[in-house]
Amino acid sequence: ELGVAKAEWLAAPDEDKSVFLASFQAAQENAKTANDNVRIAQKAFKMLLDDTTPAQGGEFLPDNLQTSVAGSQINVPSASGSSIVPVGLGNFESVRTTGYCYVDKTRYIKELVESGEKYFLSRPRKFGKSMVISMLECFFLGKHRYHLFQGLEVARHPPHINGANCVQWGPEMEPFGLITLDFSRLTFEKGKEVFEEDIIRALANVGASYGLQIEMWTVKGAIVDLVEKLALDPRNKHRKVVVLIDEYDAPIVKVMEALNVEAMRTAEENRDVLASVFSVLKSLSQKGYIAFEFVTGVTKLAKTSLFSGGNDLRDISRRKDFAMICGFSWDEVQATFQKEFFEELQKDVGLEDEMVLRERIMWWYNGYSWGEGAPTVLNPHSICSLLQEREFEAYWIEAGRTTWLTKLIASDPKRLVHATTEGTVASTNFMKNIDVSFGLSDDDLRSLLVQTGYLTVKEVVRDTKTGKRTFVLSVPNEEVRASLLPELWSFYFRVPLNVKLVTSLARCLNENDLKGFARYYNSMMNKIPSTASGEAVKYEGYYHTVLLLLLGLVEGISVQSEAGTSKGRADLWIDTGRFLFCIELKKTLKGENVNDALDSGMEQIWDRDYIIGNPLVPRRQSFAVVMVGGAKRRKIVAVRQQKVVDNSGRIDRVGDPLDWFC
């Protein structure tokens, strides 16, 4: 058909070629479909010829687990804690049988399985999601892995599994049919066909491990075939299946790291494949085949069928009763790890006081919170790395970075700084579903920053009249703050950030030394190649972006951008805790007098009532400030500072303004 259509198209007169071209293109699609069917049939036939599927019989347990450490003795650490830190480990069985420290999270199993629901959990990378999946896998293997839970909370309070006729978990419980998939380990970068093939291969491997053969060669067909065969297998005493999926969003998020049109097309195709996966799982759950389902990921992606209105997965990401399912509390850290770890750490970093050490650890690695009333948690990967390496470093930001995000904002870091500035607010949908796109809305960007761990919930403010909640977001800790600012700076200006100069800038603000601030700012700008600024230097927004980048993530300094009144918006508010600066940025045009720009900026602050209504003015030493950038140079050429006071709602100037020319 393809050959005939091509010949007719080539032989057709010019005026008729468009008609024959359409026929040729249709024939190409038919040929592609035929080739796909041949490839699928060949793969199925090869598996039949190989006849590698093990025979059924014996225990209802995957053969890859029968030969592992089943029945081996648990290696329980002493009361003083283990001497082995599990950096980067996500395998519950390995941790429990080789003497690693384990922070007991099994108490959450009881509520999960007794409710009879299906769940979704979002947490940043390297935050313990895989350990939760592995823990649940061992739990549902029943009597074959019961010994791994000796001494843990779930063994002291064994639950009933509501999704399986309230069967009691314990040393006699028969195992469930288990389907465990880690989507981050699949091949998804090479297009839809390869991704679908790898899902089918993974499902076939699960079936083969139980002595079952998958006979359907589409994703939906393979899922239905496997679930039904596992549920109806005579060895399965529960007649139900448990589905555990880790890193469901990896086939989309990791593909998008390339940030090109081809990556976008592949990500959208992968999203459609995921939609078919979760759609058929939903149908099987409604038919009663699935006793329990648990899905993890970093981001909540729209159009995957996972979060559609009819889906029965319950999102526990923001529930405060599950706030500690991933991450450590300080009490858990102290109870789990040997005291010698902290003594050695204290000695190596040169701290004499235990309380100072605790405060340093909390400042660096604590601060993550995902909802109203939820406790803050320590980053587990960073804590384990700290205790092993005994240095305060940015461990998680290297292992858990979301490359898609950092590349996405490279062309416009100003938006990210707006989003990460202390005091950023969001409505209740700050954990909203994100659509696959290169051009994220501000709300999508804020949601992505929270879900990936760059932002967290600092405070929840509730309107006393309407009850409406507003979530105040902030950078969680020093680890993120100290890593994110240099990365943004390097992306935007293509030179390393001079951290000492940033420290000097912050010190000048804390000392109300704006002349020194301008001097250090100009010194920093001298180090930036002119090619990195381009035409942007001609505009006030350039200075706005630079100041946001420099100050937006500095500990102890709160920067609010373009906060306004009914008459207009001030460019920047900078609050040091002692001093409050309302800053208007001006750029002199060619031939314009610098004094005129200073006058114009100060008049704008007064005429548009920028300072009126700011609740911090009465509680701080407050100043109206104008900073002027040069017409040709990238420097601050002049600063005017006017002290102000709030007299019962009326803003008064105090003394004469101070001018500095740089």
Image: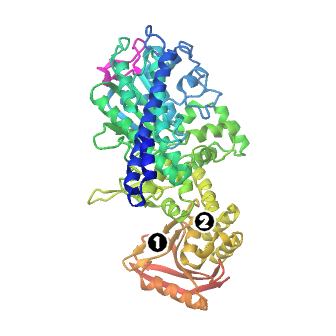
Q: Secondary structure at mark 2?
A: helix
Res. 456 in view: no
| Residue 112 lies in the magenta stretch | no
Q: Earlier in the sequence, mark 1 or mark 2?
A: 2
Image location (x, y in percent) of residue 624: 52, 79
User: Which residue matches tag 1?
Assistant: 562
User: Which residue matches tag 2?
Assistant: 550
Image location (x, y in percent) of residue 94: 58, 23
| Residue that appears at 57% across and 34% down | 334
Amino acid type at circle 2 is: Leu
Picture quarter with the C terminus: bottom right
Q: Secondary structure at mark 1?
A: loop
| Residue 171 lies in the magenta stretch | yes
In the rendered structure, which segment of residues is drawn in magenta?
A: 157-177
Q: Give whichever of 640, 56 is nearer the camera.
A: 56
Quarter of image, res 60: top left
